[in-house]
């Protein structure tokens, strides 16, 4: 009887791809995957450590899994912890959670099947991954067990990050930016399209930095990146445009520092690229951008948004901002509110600053109280809620191409999976297909069709 492996995966889409790779390695070793944690011989908790609330959720999931074993649901069950929190805090967690049978790092995701075998055999698993930063990136032929609906997939085009943002520790957890080759990414996309995938969500820590490291290796450190000849997001999108099939490709997690006129022109010229840009800006006040070490100025951001909207008709821009960053004054926060109200982003999220151990910002004076963060969060989101509801009502009477997620639930090109609004259908439609529907009403953020 083969070993059954269950998984609880938390966090972002990038972590979800890691989970898919881990489960792919389990299947490759002849084991079974189960969605019932109680019947799993081995349960894996794939953790997130992006902000405090994510770490708390991860710890709660680990403790709950252990307590379930103690209640006799699966007394011999083994417990493995993976993901960003394991990568970053494995030494501390080993001491505080001896009940966990193994902690594995981000370089070991492709080896989960072999690690499970060692854990089942009660062998000691000490991989020593905390001594070095991760270097692994997946390939097109890496075994994966997709956890997304059959019509939608995440494609990780790069891993790691080179940005010095003072609030963030992702480079410490995930290592330096490293791009997959274009051949590898295109091979994966062609395979997914052949399987019937209608939506390809390109992800990495900084999607707009894709290929720059590959070009530097090829041309030498003193040569500028040539988006016409070297690997880049521009050349990748042009190649994707040539792939036969009815699908759209969506750009997630772009950085304002790496946009160019050529990239805007390429998106406008490629009808398979969704008119949707995810571009976390974090703040707009000049002094805040400097303290956050965002490598962009207010003038650059203002000009970029104008260029994006002028150059890509029908574009929906999604962004995120941080409130309550150390030292944020009332004047700086008010400038952010004015910016949100004036620019009117189609999609927007607000994070309350999380003090991350090991980050530059954690040591800064002027830490803002939790009460103030919450108050600023509510004020910013109330402005955006009004904008979003107005924009939803403006769509009434127009016809849109929709991707059907469930028989009565679909999304527009302007809505990424899991984070954006939905379209509620009056009549059942075939899941995984594109349909053209007229919008008949709006219900908060969601549309009716």
Image: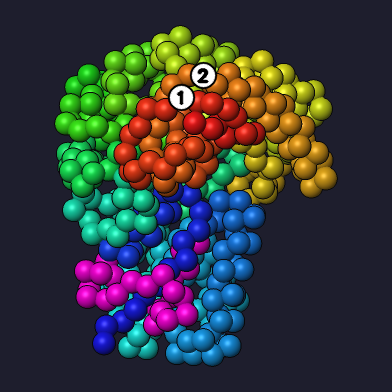
Q: On residue 318, which mark appears?
A: none
Circle 1 SS class:
strand
> Marks 1 and 2: in contact by CB < 8 Å?
yes
Could you say where residue 405 lies in the image, as x and y percent from the top left?
A: 41, 44
The residue segment tinted magenta is: 25-47
- The residue closer to the viewer here, 359 or 306, is 306
- The residue closer to the viewer here, 132 or 351, is 351
Which residue occupies 54% across, 32% down?
448
Left-right relation of 349 to 311: right
Give the vertical position of 350 relative to 52 (above or below): above
Q: Say which label, 2 or 1, has the lower sequence index.
A: 2
Which residue occupies 34% across, 79% down?
4
Tell me the residue that label 1 is attached to: 438
Tell me the residue that label 2 is attached to: 397
Whether residue 36 is in magenta: the answer is yes
Circle 2 SS class:
loop
């Amino acid at each position: 009887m083969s070993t059954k492996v269950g998984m609880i995966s938390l966090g972002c889409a990038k972590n979800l791809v890691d989970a898919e790779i881990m489960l792919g390695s389990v299947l490759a070793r002849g084991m079974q995957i189960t969605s019932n944690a109680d019947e799993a011989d081995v349960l894996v908790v794939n953790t997130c450590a992006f902000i405090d609330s994510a770490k708390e959720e991860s710890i709660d999931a680990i403790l709950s899994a252990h307590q379930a074993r103690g209640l006799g649901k699966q007394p011999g069950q083994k417990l493995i912890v993976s993901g960003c929190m394991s990568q970053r805090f494995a030494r501390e967690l080993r001491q505080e959670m001896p009940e966990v049978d193994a902690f594995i790092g981000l370089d070991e995701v492709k080896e989960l099947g072999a690690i499970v075998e060692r854990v089942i055999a009660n062998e000691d698993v000490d991989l020593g991954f905390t001594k070095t930063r991760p270097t692994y990136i997946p390939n097109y032929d890496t075994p994966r067990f997709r956890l997304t609906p059959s019509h939608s997939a995440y494609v990780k085009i790069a891993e790691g990050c080179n940005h010095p943002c003072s609030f963030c520790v992702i480079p410490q957890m995930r290592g330096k930016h490293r791009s997959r080759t274009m051949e590898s990414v295109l091979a994966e996309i062609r395979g997914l399209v052949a399987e019937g995938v209608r939506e390809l969500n390109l992800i990495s820590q900084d999607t707009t930095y894709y290929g720059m490291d590959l070009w530097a290796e090829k041309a030498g450190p003193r040569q500028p990146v040539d988006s016409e000849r070297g690997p880049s997001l521009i050349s990748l999108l042009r190649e994707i445009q040539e792939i036969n099939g009815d699908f759209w490709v969506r750009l997630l997690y772009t950085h304002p520092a790496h946009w160019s006129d050529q990239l805007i022109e390429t998106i406008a010229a490629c009808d398979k690229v969704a008119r949707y840009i995810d571009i976390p800006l974090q703040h707009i006040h000049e002094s805040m951008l400097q303290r956050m070490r965002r490598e962009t100025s207010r003038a650059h951001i203002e000009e970029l948004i104008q260029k994006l909207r002028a150059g890509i008709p029908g574009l929906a821009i999604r962004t995120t901002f941080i409130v309550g960053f150390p030292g944020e004054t009332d004047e700086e926060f008010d400038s952010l509110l004015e910016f949100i109200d004036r620019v009117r982003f189609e999609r927007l999220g607000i994070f309350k600053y999380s003090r991350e151990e090991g980050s530059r910002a954690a040591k800064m004076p002027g830490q803002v109280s939790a009460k103030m963060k919450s108050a600023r969060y509510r004020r910013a989101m109330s402005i955006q809620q009004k904008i979003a509801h107005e924009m939803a009502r403006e769509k009434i009477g127009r016809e849109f191409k929709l991707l059907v997620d469930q028989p009565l639930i679909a999304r527009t090109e302007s809505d990424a999976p899991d984070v954006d609004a939905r379209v509620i259908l009056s009549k059942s439609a075939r899941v995984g297909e594109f349909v053209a529907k007229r919008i008949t009403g709006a219900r908060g953020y969601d549309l009716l069709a």
